[in-house]
Amino acid sequence: MKRPVAIHNSRLVLPPVLCAPVEHYVMAWVAEHSAPDAAARFDKRFKAAHRFAIADTRGVMTLTVPIAKPATSRCLWSDILISDHGRWWDVHRVALESAYGRTPYFEFYIDSFLPMLTADVMERFPKLTELQQAWDAAIREHLGMEGAAAGPASPLEALLTFDDSLSGADLEPYRQIRADRLGFIPGLSVLDLLFNLGPEAALYLNREARRIAPRLSRQA
């Protein structure tokens, strides 16, 4: 069954982010098609391109993929290479296991993410945008979403704008494994949603997408 869509004949242009937060996928769910901005210019201040947040036993933890310094700052994010500094893939894998190993759905999903968490990741995805797309494709598959749409919008599509004023705090809380001790933590990577809710993550996204759709539909 095709997923419900809040705004038909629409396309949402997304910022290039890594393991995006839940609100990113809520907005992607609103549109019939969505894809990262292929022409986004590199900006070293935009840390979400190579960092994402999870929740471990102590609270929010930020995981970073180091990037190689570009030859010039006047380039695109699609030109940026990832670095092997600190064997970050091992750090990420261990951190995810520690944070989510006891969640209901960790073992169900983790194998599909291992290509982005093992030593050959540098050969598989040498560019940052390639790594972003690999994570996004695996996440979308588990959520029952279509792949990121390629190419320009057709004349029949309404082009929606990513609403960066929406934060995790605007979304309804969902079950988190340590909420009894830490309280609900908003703004985390969608991986947190998947590991905690499993198949129910799609139901959550659909409900939240319909709730925030008017915020985007006014821009259609």
Image: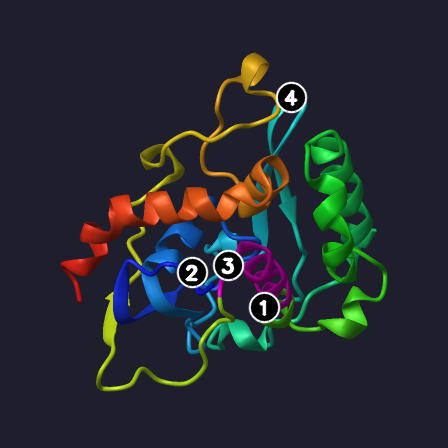
Residue depth check, mark 1 versus mark 3: number of the one nearer the observer: 1
Question: Marks 4 and 3, how far apart in space?
Answer: 25 Å
Q: Quadrant of residue 54?
A: top right
Q: Name the residue under label 4.
A: 58
| First of labels 1, 4 by sequence position | 4
| Element marked by disc 2 | loop
The kind of residue tagged 4 is Arg
Query: Which of the image's four quarters has the C terminus?
Result: bottom left
Residue depth check, mark 2 versus mark 1: number of the one nearer the observer: 2
Q: Can residue 72 be seen in this view?
A: no
Q: Which residue is drawn at 59% across and 66% down?
A: 137
User: Does 178 appear above or below 41?
Assistant: above
Q: Mark 2 points at which residue?
A: 3
The kind of residue tagged 2 is Arg
Residue 63 percent coordinates (x, y): 65, 44
The disc placed on residue 133 is 1
Q: Can residue 155 be seen in this view?
A: yes
Residue 19 placement, left or right of 8: right
Range shown magenta: 132-145
Question: Marks 1 and 3, how far apart in space?
Answer: 9 Å
Q: Mark 3 points at which residue?
A: 17
Q: Which residue is drawn at 32% across and 58% down?
A: 30
Question: Marks 1 and 4, how far apart in space?
Answer: 29 Å
| Element marked by disc 1 | helix
Residue 171 percent coordinates (x, y): 35, 36
